Amino acid sequence: MQPDLHSRALAAHALHQFRTLSPLTHCMTNEVVQNFTANTLLALGASPAMVIEPEEASQFAAVAHAVLINVGTLTESRAIAMRAAVEQAQRANTPWTLDPVAVGALEFRRRFCLDLLSLQPAAIRGNASEILALAGMRGGGRGVDTTDTAAAALPAAQALACRVASIVVVTGEVDYVTDGQRTVSIRGGDPLMTRVVGTGCALSAVVAASCALQGDRLSNVASACSWMKQAGEFATEHSTGPGSFIPAFLDALYNLNAQELA
Amino acid sequence: MQPDLHSRALAAHALHQFRTLSPLTHCMTNEVVQNFTANTLLALGASPAMVIEPEEASQFAAVAHAVLINVGTLTESRAIAMRAAVEQAQRANTPWTLDPVAVGALEFRRRFCLDLLSLQPAAIRGNASEILALAGMRGGGRGVDTTDTAAAALPAAQALACRVASIVVVTGEVDYVTDGQRTVSIRGGDPLMTRVVGTGCALSAVVAASCALQGDRLSNVASACSWMKQAGEFATEHSTGPGSFIPAFLDALYNLNAQELA
Amino acid sequence: MQPDLHSRALAAHALHQFRTLSPLTHCMTNEVVQNFTANTLLALGASPAMVIEPEEASQFAAVAHAVLINVGTLTESRAIAMRAAVEQAQRANTPWTLDPVAVGALEFRRRFCLDLLSLQPAAIRGNASEILALAGMRGGGRGVDTTDTAAAALPAAQALACRVASIVVVTGEVDYVTDGQRTVSIRGGDPLMTRVVGTGCALSAVVAASCALQGDRLSNVASACSWMKQAGEFATEHSTGPGSFIPAFLDALYNLNAQELA
């Protein structure tokens, strides 16, 4: 059974809410994508902040609307700070989101991510190989690239969502968002997005921020996926390669029109 | 009493000097904006270098024309390296500039910045909330965003400049540059600049580099603000959002014409 | 005697090979250029990965097609991880490339780079001052900038290549690639490339990735230089400054046509 497509009207409504709240989003993310992640959030109307010292990260997690943990360039000292932030987020009821980058290929981050799962993430966003690995079903994965399709990882995503009581997003040509019971799909985007570093990581930041919205979290997270796919499509049409895609994508997010979306 | 507008003729003259000197600018800045900061300095004709290991940072501070300290993603180990660089800068008479990012919201960096103030910064650049916090008057501030206007922070900036014997720059819709006695203002720019991460941080780097110029430091620092506001205005006119703003801004800095400025 | 120009036909053939292999390239590089480096590799069809924790970096060096070590923002902890990766690369026969950024100006990284030379780099890529310094002939160098021409450093590059049994690339207005016996030159590019941070660092990553190709390594590395110079020329023609150069350069790499090259 094919999951229902996420409704454009819901995506438009969530976008309006998102811009009104302007969620203060505490991103503990990898060194490669910090700038693009911040610009993505700013373009959509959120307020990003990257705070990484353990004491400060913990202090900030209590103040922020949402926290993102992305393990792309994890180190031991960063892991300590991330854990402090997540523990504080949990105490303060700040929703936090996990992006388990390349978790299938590397042991140190796999142990760290599995350990964090007990601290109730609001959402988890990964590609098929990452979600399969996190769910304990070994997928392929080649560095940070997936070798599996999102659809193939959907059962793993659903099982993981049930086990962790979290929203799980598995992205690819089609994105799937599931809480284990309900699943919706989001189409769109373009393969050119895989030729720009950080589009997946930036989506995780937007997913994290969308968890701060009121209402149905599954729908809000699916809306985040929808905004990014829409902007990616628009940017692809208006660019001549991955270089010009980047400014076009940020412009598209900035100019994303709730009415057009719907 | 409204401070005098900084003269365009002075900004044009300082730009010419800046390009002639090509100040070697040692930037110890946050992880999010390093690339944009380096490209901003390069576009204006300066030579950026990011050196962060304590021994090297100290060695380099003696060779560089100017040093920037930006605490956006401060860690304990980075703080040690920054302090070593600042101490060496002071010994070598290399002017150093402080950007106290989010200093009002977070304790670890607040202690660090207050501690550094005794080491005679040439300049301090922050938004209103940051300058208020550094001056000991608690401003609002929401993450890295200000909740106060630059004008509201001007008395704090003037008091801080007197106390530390430094140039203080408080930026916003209007920028103010003060040494405690004299104050000039710079108009221009565009709110779109706040939707691009690192425009403020990059300004701090240009302020740092401008402290290496000969002549009146207050005027040179105000000129740095003027170049950035001019380029920001031009880039806004030639872009369709924050994405296309970035290349347009760097191009505008590169093509900034001393004659047009004046 | 002027070295032979590298043949366009060889560059075109190598590009085809490169896109077919899509080398998984493990980049341990400086904080300033990670994003641009990843996007450069992606645009050319390679698969970048930035893994920095010592255990993971070592694990990944055995899986990757190629490893890059760039010491631009070296720290003690990063040096430990880099050394672990290089040792594993050597054991696994993964070719690794060294970019000795600013090695002439700073002691800590000089000791580290000299130490690594005993671990058989496949290639070394630097500007004239860096290659002179690494070869033990002190060049000038001003921060990360060279004060020598590539041609002046060619004898040092040849001597270094012989001593280390590696390919040495010294870049500038003309690039030279040598194994100590044979030397080829690559013309093209544009001075605008020196106004964009990371074009040299990104070339080192492409050089590293090209060492994973089968066939004559000297020729493959020279081809990497050729692709970058070609794209740089094209991007300069299609941009109005260093800001618009960046997207134009990535687009040019993405659209680089093996037939046009030849």
Image (cartoon, coloured by chain):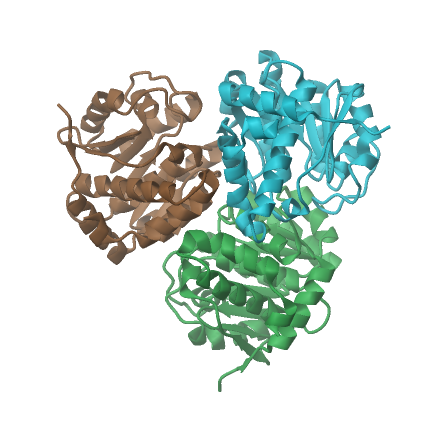
Chain colours: A brown, B green, C cyan
Does residue C59 sit above or below A215 in this rendering? above
Please state which of residues C115 and A220 is positioned toward the viewer in this rendering.
Answer: A220
Q: Position of residue B35 (x, y in %)?
A: 54, 47
Residue at the location (50% across, 56% down)?
B248
Left or right for B54, reference A80? right
- What residue do we see at 27% from left, 39% from top? A225
Q: Is residue B11 left or right of residue A261?
A: right
Q: Residue at 22% across / 43% down in the picture?
A: A223
The residue lying furthest to the right in this view is C1
Q: Answer whether residue B127 is visible to the viewer in this image.
A: yes
Q: Position of residue A26 (x, y in %)?
A: 36, 47
Query: Toward which corner of the image does residue B102 lie, by quadrant?
Result: bottom left
Image location (x, y in percent) of residue C78: 58, 32
Image quarter where the C terminus of chain B lies is bottom right
In the depicted structure, whether residue C174 falls above or below residue B231: above
Q: Residue at x 66, y 55 (%)?
A: B46
